[in-house]
Amino acid sequence: MAGTLALTRAELKRLTRNKRYFIFTVALPVILYLLIGRSVSATVYGVSFHAFYMVDMAMLGAFSGALSGNAQRISQEKKEGWIRQLRLTSLPAYAYVVSKVIVSMATTVTSIVIVLLLGRFFGNVHLAAWQWLAVAVTIWFSATIFAALAVAIGYRVAPDQVQPITFILYFGFAILGGIWYPLSGALKTIGQVTPTYQAIKVGTDIIEGVSVSAGLAIGLVVWLAIFVALATLAVRATAESV
């Protein structure tokens, strides 16, 4: 366990020097919320647009940080032999994957907290303490889903193919999840099965003060189970080659 934590600390230090990573996970959601968060007066999913867009941008930072950057780095490190080198040490076989997931979760906290603070003090979103915590935990948990997907992609896909694949997945989950705009009609019917939509809807239901649908909560757990299974299969499939 000590070795895993040491590797995690090293990964965190390295990631803090990655400006591109923080542009997409922190700067982009913050800028978009500052530009758009108070510019629309409407009710979306039962809450004010200010509150809806706050959940949206927190979700954007969390899921993009967990998916895009991680998948590329894992694939590149696999190609360069870094994972093979780690397996020659006394670290347990799971240490690398666990460290990546922990780092992803630690860094997504930053974007979530900043956007929620903007929602409170810039967007004038007023919630009870438990609601703030519940919204933050929901988005944070959903980031775990995409961290698991990043492991699956990174282990199975070559570095030059990771970017287009994550690009397609990124925009697919963003558009169908309603991150760029609220969903309605047929698109909403399709998007309801995506983890991005489910996380956002759980967040807005918490803000609205209505009972969260069990189907939404179960959906997030199912997506996590699917991507963890894919990540496990990917790691096992490449165990002898990396």
Image: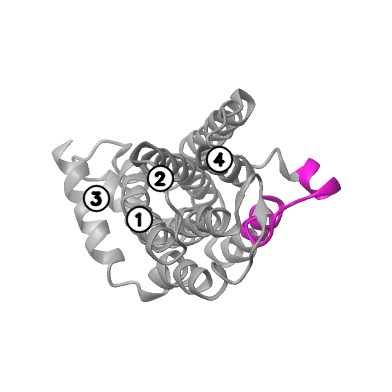
Between 164 and 33, which is closer to the camera in this rendering? 33
Crowding at label 2, few (<14), some or many (≥20) Cα neighbours within 10 Å? Answer: many
User: Magenta region, mostly helix, strand or loop?
Assistant: helix
Q: Earlier in the sequence, mark 2 or mark 1?
A: 1
The residue at which mark 4 appears reads as 208
Q: Which residue is mark 1?
A: 113
Disc 2 and disc 1 in contact, CB within 8 angstroms: yes
Instruction: Give the Cα separation between the discs numbered 4 and 3.
Output: 37 Å
Say whether residue 80 is left or right of residue 173.
left
Q: Is residue 170 inside the magenta stretch?
A: yes
Q: Which residues are magenta?
A: 169-190
Q: Dot 1: within a 10 Å radius of its alpha carbon, few (fewer than 14), some, or many (20 or more) residues?
A: some
Q: Could you say which quadrant of the image residue 20 lies in?
A: bottom left
Label 3 to label 2, Cα distance in Å? Answer: 23 Å
Q: Amino acid at mark 2?
A: Ala
Q: Are marks 4 and 1 in contact (CB under 8 Å)?
A: no
